[in-house]
Amino acid sequence: MTKPQYEKYCESTPTILVKETFGNANIYSQNTQSLLTKATGFIAAYDFTLNPYRGCQYGCSYCYAVAFSPNPKMRQDWGNWVIIKQNAVEVLEKELNRWCQKNPGKFPKIYMSSVTDPYQPIESKKQLTRRLLEVMLEYRPILVIQTRSPIITRDIDILQRFKHLRINMSIPTGSEVVRKDFEPRSPSIKARFNALTKIKKNIDPLKGYVPKISITVTPLLPTLPADVTNFINQLQIGDRIVIQEFHSSQNRLLVATTRQEALTIKQKYAWWYENEKVNYLVFKDKLTSLKDIEIIEGKDGFTY
Ligand code: SF4
């Protein structure tokens, strides 16, 4: 047990401060009562969301998940802490077992993850997501993995064993300079596209299942004019592109902290945001020139 640096946190839940920092993040470890959460909102089509971690080292400036921080201090410090759900593997096994007994002949629909990145940097060391995938395999879920991390390629050997898998790779801009402003700790755009290429190249359809691939351009951030053509071309690696406008949520107290950060960055790109609706439509129009790719706007794009 530890007294963490976040006042009033962990007083009722036994928490271990893992003896290391990973990058700049403080890493904690806790047992969890449950892992599968009933899916609601834009992913209500699923039975469950599954978040192996609480918090996210990528700390994107526009992240809505900040609202699910345990307290205001941690909300402010989004990106600098992660809680590992220590007993997640055992809990998942029990929960899936129970669900399948109650729903014979059905396969659970799972969205991993809604408020964290299951392949954030700590995953390369802890391998929690990998172990959860191993448990899920047995229950033959319809699974969507939402990430922006090339670490996912480490698990190709397991991913190819899922018959119903969609990988949603978040790539909200085609310009590195914009990516570095809005999400400076996240993997480069190149690394994300390379990861998708690696997945496609390394799964032999005769030996494994090739996952469906979406690129989630959500929220749609500006792409510099010089990068647009290249970005559109690269997007062809997916079978679906999801786009969504930047959510303005200035009046929502729970997301104020990082939202303000993103709003400040937006000012730097006034040339794009002053005409956001038009620029959104222009980008969407360019996407429609792509062949054999679904272009879906908003929450409908997050279905399996
Ligand atoms: S990777 Fe996803 S969950 Fe993590 S900070 Fe960025 S938007 Fe939030």
Image (tube, helix red, strand yellow):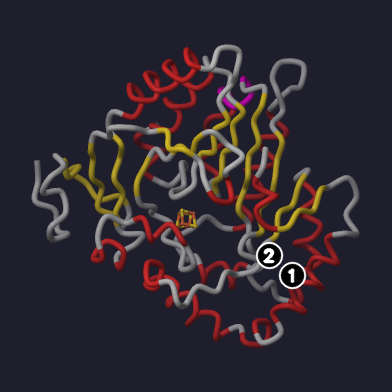
Image-quadrant location for residue 12: top left
Q: Amino acid at mark 2?
A: Gly
- Classify residue 304 as left or right of residue 226: left
- Classify residue 108 as left or right of residue 90: right
The residue to which callout 1 is attached is 227
Residue 232 in the image: above or below residue 110: below
Q: Position of residue 60 (x, y in %)?
A: 46, 63
Q: Position of residue 211 (x, y in %)?
A: 69, 31
Q: Position of residue 297 (x, y in %)?
A: 73, 58
**Local crowd size for mark 2, using a 10 Å CA cut-off: few (<14), some (14–19), many (≥20):** many
Contact, mark 2 vs mark 1 (Cβ under 8 Å) = yes
Q: Which residues are magenta?
A: 157-161
The residue to which callout 2 is attached is 174
145 within the magenta span = no
| Residue at image location 79% in from the left, 69% down from the top | 283
For residue 97, the mark is none
